[in-house]
């Protein structure tokens, strides 16, 4: 069966960091311990304190034989895991929406997107990149997303929340309209320790605890904003993937949203127009899953099979490379149709890869 990885990551490596430091020496410097960067005076990743991030030297899988530092190495690793194509989300590049100096943020986004496009161009049809943009910077963010589309990048990263706004803020409507016009899907992806807004994890300083609740809370917050805030009503052609939290949370949470819509939807200013299940059926909501999730067949029984996309989390510690696809290829509780859709067909539709 064909398999498309809907949420892999690129390990940018030292060369990109060195180039960035050379271009913006006033904004980017190495951390004193050599494990990460200081950008605009903030540590990336932030290794201590509330919402602490993953220690950078422990971020990758320890499975033997990993070769994630070059495109050729990534393709080889993908073949070892029976993955035909990979959509690569940023790692260091996830910092982009948090950058505050407008000129630096725009320059870094353009630099990063060109670097990632060149990286993926060495393996056409195998590697696809996801763009970054300083989403809060209005017309500049839109122009950078437009340039990224021209570069061949297949989606744009959006954080689960912004410094002073939720994702349903009217200031973002022009950005969402542009994404629809460009046929550019959006991928909601958080990251502990990357100076994004903290949702619930500010109670914890241990990365394991932070990571345990951070991803699902991030995705629930983002979905609440987009669904109850009317974003999909104002932009019915918008496609959004909720990433890095698995799929088991979705039946519970979308039913919880529905209950609030039915009983108190009129309490939302401006009115809450549609049942949350409608946005799922309309193709606004997509979710990634691991191949071995025990609740996957139940999610499909409740919500269907047309919105779920396999994700490996390669090359991070949280993935199962080089056996991340094995459960999907072998599990007997999914129909052949479901396995084909989760394995590749849904991702091909979401990212427009066919």
Image (spheres, grey):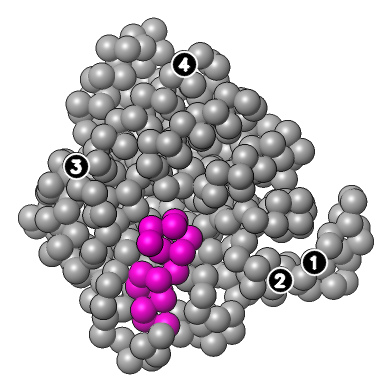
Per the model, the C-alpha gap separating discs 2 and 3 is 40 Å
Per the image, the residue denoted by label 2 is: 278
For residue 274, the mark is 1
Q: Quadrant of the C terminus?
A: bottom left
Q: Quadrant of the N terminus?
A: bottom left
Per the model, the C-alpha gap separating discs 2 and 1 is 7 Å
Per the model, the C-alpha gap separating discs 3 and 1 is 44 Å
Q: Which structural element holds mark 4? A: helix
> Is residue 218 something that shows in the picture?
yes
Residue in the image at 26% along x and 35% along y = 118
Q: Which of the two labelled residues, at mark 4 and mark 2, occupies the earlier sequence position? A: 4
Nearer mark to the viewer, of 2 and 3:
3
Q: Which structural element holds mark 2? A: helix
Q: Which residue is the extreme one toward the top?
A: 26
Q: How crowded is mark 2: few (under 14 residues within 10 Å), some or many (20 or more)?
A: few
Q: How crowded is mark 3: few (under 14 residues within 10 Å), some or many (20 or more)?
A: few
For residue 349, the mark is none
For residue 122, the mark is 3
Per the image, the residue denoted by label 4 is: 104
The span picked out in magenta is 338-354
Per the model, the C-alpha gap separating discs 4 and 2 is 40 Å
């Amino acid at each position: 069966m064909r398999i498309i990885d809907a949420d892999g990551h690129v390990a940018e490596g030292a060369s990109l960091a060195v180039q960035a430091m050379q271009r913006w020496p006033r904004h980017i410097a190495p951390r004193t311990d050599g494990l990460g960067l200081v950008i605009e005076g903030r540590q990336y990743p932030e290794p201590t304190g509330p919402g602490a991030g993953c220690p950078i030297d422990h971020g990758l899988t320890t499975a033997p034989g990993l070769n994630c530092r070059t495109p050729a190495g990534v393709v080889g690793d993908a073949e070892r895991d029976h993955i035909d194509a990979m959509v690569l989300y940023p790692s260091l590049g996830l910092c982009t929406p948090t950058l505050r100096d407008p000129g630096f943020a725009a320059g870094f986004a353009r630099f990063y997107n060109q670097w990632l496009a060149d990286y993926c161009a060495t393996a056409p049809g195998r590697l696809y990149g996801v763009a970054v943009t300083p989403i809060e910077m209005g017309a500049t963010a839109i122009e950078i997303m437009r340039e990224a589309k021209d570069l061949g990048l297949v989606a744009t990263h959006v954080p689960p929340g912004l410094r002073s706004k939720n994702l349903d803020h009217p200031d973002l409507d022009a950005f969402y309209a542009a994404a629809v016009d460009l046929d550019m899907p959006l991928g909601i992806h958080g990251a502990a320790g990357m100076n994004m807004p903290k949702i619930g994890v500010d109670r914890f300083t241990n990365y394991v605890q932070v990571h345990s609740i951070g991803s699902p809370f991030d995705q629930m917050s983002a979905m609440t904003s987009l669904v109850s805030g009317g974003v999909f009503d104002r932009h019915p052609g918008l496609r959004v993937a909720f990433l890095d939290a698995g799929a088991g949370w979705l039946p519970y949470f979308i039913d919880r949203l529905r209950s609030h819509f039915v009983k108190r939807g009129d309490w939302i200013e401006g009115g809450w127009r549609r049942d949350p299940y409608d946005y799922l059926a309309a193709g606004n909501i997509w979710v990634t899953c691991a191949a071995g999730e025990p609740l996957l067949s139940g999610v499909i029984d409740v919500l269907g099979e047309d919105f779920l996309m396999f994700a490996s989390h390669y090359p991070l510690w949280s993935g199962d490379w080089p056996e991340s696809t094995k459960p999907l290829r072998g599990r007997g509780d999914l129909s052949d149709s479901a396995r084909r859709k989760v394995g590749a067909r849904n991702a091909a539709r979401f990212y427009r890869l066919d």
